[in-house]
Amino acid sequence: MKTLKPLLTAFILAAAASSVFAQSTYKNLPLLKANSSKVNVRVGDVFVNGFWTVKPEYNPNSLHIQVNGQKERLVFYTDIDSATYDIKPEQAKQFYVLLNRQHYVLTEVKGFTLASNATEQNKNRFLSIDKPKSKTFGTLWEKHHVGDVVNDINNYADKASGAVNWAKGKLFGSDQ
C-alpha cells in the first residue's frame, strides 16, 4: 500500500499537468487565446512585433508566408498564448483565435514560393488588376493612368520583397 500511494499521487499530478499544458481546440482546430488583436509573429529567425492583426470581420483571416526551402517555421505570439507551425509551400494551416473571450476568429496561414517564370509571377503580383472592360471605368483607368500606378506599385513590391529576401539570406543564410 505504501508504494501505491506515491504512484497514485504521481498519476494524478501527471493528469493535471497534461490538462494544463494541452492545446485548446475549437471545432476540432487549435485555439489560441488573445485579449489584444495585435499578434507578434516569428518567421524562421525573423521576429516582427505587432505583425498580424486579428480581424473578426474576416472569415478566414488569411496570412501568406513565403517559404524558402522545404519549410518555414512560423510562431504566433498573442498576449496570452502562442502556437508554432511548420509551413510548407502551398500548404495551409488553420486555427482559431479566441479574441477577448467572445470572437472565434478562423485564421489560415498558407505557404508560397516565389515563381520562377514570368507568367506565374504576373499571376502572383502584389496587385493583379486588369483594365476594366466597361467603357466608363476603362476611360477613367486611362485618364488617371491607373495601369501605370499598378505597375509602379508592383515594381516597388518586387524590389522590397527582393531586398527583404536578400537581407534575410545575408543575416540567416540562404538555406532558410
Image (cartoon, helix red, strand yellow):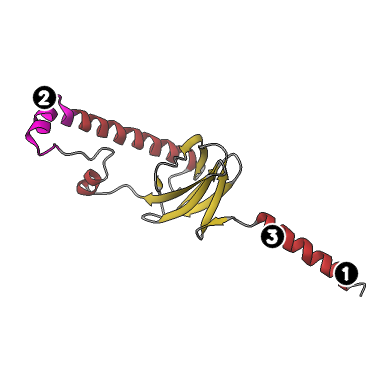
> Which numbered disc, 1 or 3, marks the residue that appears first in the sequence?
1
66 relative position to 22: left or right: left
7 relative position to 47: left or right: right
Residue 62: assigned label:
none
Q: Which residue position is annotated with label 2?
A: 143
Q: Which of the 4 quarters of the picture holds residue 166?
A: top left
Q: Give the residues in magenta.
A: 131-148
Question: Dividing the image into 4 quarters, which one contains the N terminus?
Answer: bottom right
132 relative position to 88: left or right: left
Q: Residue furthest bottom?
A: 1
Residue toward you, 89 or 50: 50
In 3D space, how far apart are the residues under numbered discs 1 and 3 (Cα atoms)? 20 Å
Q: Which residue position is annotated with label 3?
A: 18
Residue 124 place in picture, x, y as percent: 27, 45
Q: Amino acid at mark 2?
A: Lys
Q: Residue furthest left?
A: 135
Callout 3: helix, strand or loop? helix
Callout 1: helix, strand or loop? helix
* Crowd class of label 1 (few under 14; some 14 to 19; many from 20; radius 10 Å): few
Marks 1,3: beta carbons within 8 A: no
In 3D space, how far apart are the residues under numbered discs 3 and 2 (Cα atoms)? 65 Å
Q: Residue at x 24, y 45 (%)?
A: 121
Q: Residue furthest front?
A: 102
Q: Which residue position is annotated with label 1?
A: 5
Marks 2,1: beta carbons within 8 A: no
- SS majority, magenta: helix
Residue toward you, 71 or 11: 11
In 3D space, how far apart are the residues under numbered discs 2 and 1 (Cα atoms)? 84 Å
